Amino acid sequence: MKIMCSCAIAAMALLATVEARATTLTYSFDQNNSNLTGGPWANITLDDAKEGKVHITVDLLQAGYDSTGSNFGLKDFYFNENTGLTNLSLEFSYPSTWTYKYSPGSELGGVGPYGKFELVTSGSGSDRTGYLDFYLSSPTGPLSAAAFAVTSPNTAYMFAGQIGGFSEVGTDGKTYESAQFASSGRPVPPVPEPGTVTLLGAGCFALAVYAKRRKSLDT
């Protein structure tokens, strides 16, 4: 009985450790300005990365659209921060052709909802992307992913972006090929890491084997 209790306590401790070190935040584009239903249309994921950086990705979800064309992709992306710093820098991992503007003192005016950061394509339809990947850093010190998952003071949205190259009929009967999307800030439930699931599964299996052997010895 003591061993079973120890196994249970160990499993609980493992879960607590995983929760404590979890630094991944995921949100989705669940709002739009074009009477489109369905979705979500994209996932936005923020991670605390190495060297005090914050890693952000935007992954378009094609299942959220009726149909997509060859130039389907994200045209621009907006987000905010509350780090209290003014010397933040951004580095694109993909695509490398995108550019960004940062206005620490006030939010940038933009398409629909807006933010202190404005990330845009080079201007051509072929430069749209279904996947955006970049890092944020500061020479002042380490950054936190939570500091970039903040709602705009002037809107009800946390992230925003324009997506084009699809075809979808809205509730008004019109066909839309481009729309502005935004995140209301409702987090997407996290998915346990494969390693954690495997470890917990192994622990439960060992506990079951022990209980079976103990029962055999007692009979």
Image (spheres, rainbow, N blue to C red):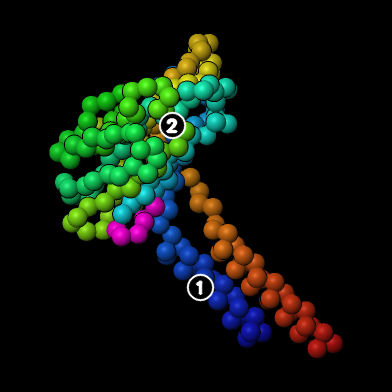
Q: Nearer the viewer, mark 2 or mark 1?
A: 2
* Mark 1 crowd level (few <14, some 14–19, many ≥20, 10 Å Cα): few
Quarter where residue 169 is shown: top right
* Res. 46 visible in picture: yes
> In the rendered structure, which disc, 2 or 1, sits on the residue that comes first in sequence?
1
Is there any visible trace of residue 156 in the rendered image?
no
Q: Amino acid at mark 1?
A: Ala
Q: Secondary structure at mark 1?
A: helix
- Residue at 34% from the left image edge and 28% from the top image edge: 121
| Disc 2 crowd, CA 10 A, few/some/many (<14, 14-19, 20+) | many
- For the C terminus, the quadrant is bottom right
In the figure, 129 relative to 86: above or below?
above
Q: Picture coordinates of residue 131 (x, y %)?
A: 45, 37
When asked about the image quadrant of residue 77, the answer is top left
- The percent position of residue 200, horizontal first and vertical second, equals 60, 68
Q: Position of residue 33 (x, y in %)?
A: 40, 21
Q: Name the residue located 39 percent from the left edge and 48 percent from the top edge.
A: 46
The residue singled out by tag 2 in the image is: 129
Quadrant placement of the N terminus: bottom right
Q: Determine the secondary structure under disc 2.
A: loop
What residue would you read off at disc 1? 13
Judged left or right of residue 95, residue 16 is: right
Which residue is nearer to you in this view: 208 or 2? 208
Is residue 93 in the magenta section? no
Q: Check whether the beta carbons of the residues at disc 2 and disc 1 lie within 8 A of each other.
A: no
147 horizontally vs 162: left or right: left
Look at the image and give the residue range highlighted in magenta.
47-52
Q: In screen coordinates, is 47 left or right of 152?
A: right
